[in-house]
Image (cartoon, rainbow, N blue to C red):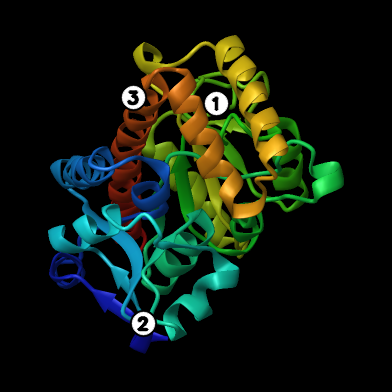
């Protein structure tokens, strides 16, 4: 397993200094935002984490290796390669053995983070049960990964293009706790309130760390969703997003867009139909998640030192 991992100099130094690490995905760079905002946002996310005392580890597949931490040049390459492979659990072995340039999804990033011993992962929003899944069976591999891989995922809830109710039901069935930050409502990416409730509300990093530590100490493997709502000033009205999403879904259906292509298509159409406002919201929410993720990594780090 270790033969597939390549640690950046910064990540190696953090390991030697016993500093807390925070994983970041790369799909948001290659498929989630346009260039150059994608690379700029990736660098800003990393700096937010550094400024709060943790060390960022952006994860991607390059030259047959899992890179834990990327250089500036590697970030630039990923952001400038629109056909980079979107890598989930199913695709990981193929991307490695075929020497593909691969951007890791939530599921693949969780796997790679766990292999590297990283407990906290920051993303924008998790995948979930797609609308119409009762006939399409389109359910993101992110959910199954949350059920099996012990990494805490800090996100702005599930993407609002999904069926939020069914997503939460799936997580409940598989024993994945959903924890909200600062409110009882479960957020829905662009909007703060999905009209559904999270399982638990834990507002401080110390409370979240205690909860996660207790879960894993009890042998309850699997992830935890830390649902952190988009800042109020950057949030979009739920009714507006819902109307736009319905239109974008109809376009996707008419064009026969399905599977892994559906989420990038919908996010791009929503950006176009909101004249770029949704991209600004996307950037604001993931930066906010980086703050919460860094604090959580530090709290877990201090908790581990106290309990050793």
Decide: few, some or many residues near mark 1? Use Cα within 10 Å; few <14, some 14-19, many ≥20.
Answer: many
Q: Secondary structure at mark 1?
A: loop
Q: Residue furthest front?
A: 255
> Cα distance, mark 1 to mark 3?
17 Å
Taking the spot 73% from the left edge, 53% from the top edge, the residue there is 174
- Quadrant housing residue 177: top right
In the picture of the structure, the residue carrying the numbered disc 3 is 280
Which circle marks residue 169 in the picture?
none
Decide: few, some or many residues near mark 2? Use Cα within 10 Å; few <14, some 14-19, many ≥20.
Answer: some
Q: Give 254 or 79, whichever is nearer the viewer.
A: 254
Res. 182 visible in picture: no
Give the mark toward the camera: 2 or 1.
Answer: 2
> Cα distance, mark 2 to mark 3?
34 Å
Q: Secondary structure at mark 3?
A: helix
Q: Are marks 2 and 3 in contact (CB under 8 Å)?
A: no
Which circle marks residue 64 in the picture?
2
**Which percent across, then down, holds residue 187?**
55, 26
Q: Residue furthest right?
A: 135
In the picture of the structure, the residue carrying the numbered disc 1 is 187
The tag earlier along the polypeptide, 2 or 1, is 2
Taking the spot 54% from the left edge, 40% from the top edge, the residue there is 265
Q: Is residue 241 above or below residue 9?
A: above
> Cα distance, mark 2 to mark 1?
37 Å
């Amino acid at each position: 397993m270790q033969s597939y991992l390549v640690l950046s100099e910064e990540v190696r130094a953090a390991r030697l200094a016993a500093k807390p690490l925070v994983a970041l995905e790369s799909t948001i760079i290659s498929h989630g935002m346009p260039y150059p905002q994608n690379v700029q946002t990736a660098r800003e996310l990393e700096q937010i984490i550094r400024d709060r005392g943790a060390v960022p580890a952006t994860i991607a597949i390059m030259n047959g290796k899992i890179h834990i931490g990327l250089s500036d040049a590697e970030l630039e390459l990923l952001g400038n390669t629109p056909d980079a492979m979107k890598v989930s659990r199913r695709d990981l072995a193929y991307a490695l053995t075929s020497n593909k340039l691969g951007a890791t999804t939530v599921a693949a990033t969780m796997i790679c983070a766990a292999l590297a011993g990283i407990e906290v992962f920051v993303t924008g929003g998790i995948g979930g049960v797609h609308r119409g899944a009762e006939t399409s069976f389109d359910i993101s591999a992110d959910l199954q990964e949350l059920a099996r891989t012990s990494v805490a995922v800090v996100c702005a809830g599930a993407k609002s293009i999904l069926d939020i109710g069914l997503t939460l039901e799936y997580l409940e069935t598989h024993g994945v706790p959903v924890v909200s930050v600062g409110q009882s409502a479960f957020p829905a990416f662009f909007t703060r309130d999905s009209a559904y409730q999270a399982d638990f509300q834990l507002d401080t990093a110390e409370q979240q760390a205690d909860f996660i530590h207790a879960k894993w100490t009890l042998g309850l493997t699997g992830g935890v969703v830390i649902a952190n709502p988009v800042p109020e000033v950057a949030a979009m009205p739920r009714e507006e997003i819902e109307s736009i999403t319905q239109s974008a879904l109809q376009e996707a259906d008419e064009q026969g867009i399905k599977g892994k292509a559906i989420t990038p298509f919908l996010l791009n159409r929503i950006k176009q139909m909101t004249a770029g406002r949704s991209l600004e919201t996307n950037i604001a929410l993931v930066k906010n998640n980086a703050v919460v993720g860094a604090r959580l990594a530090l709290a877990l780090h201090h908790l581990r030192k106290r309990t050793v």
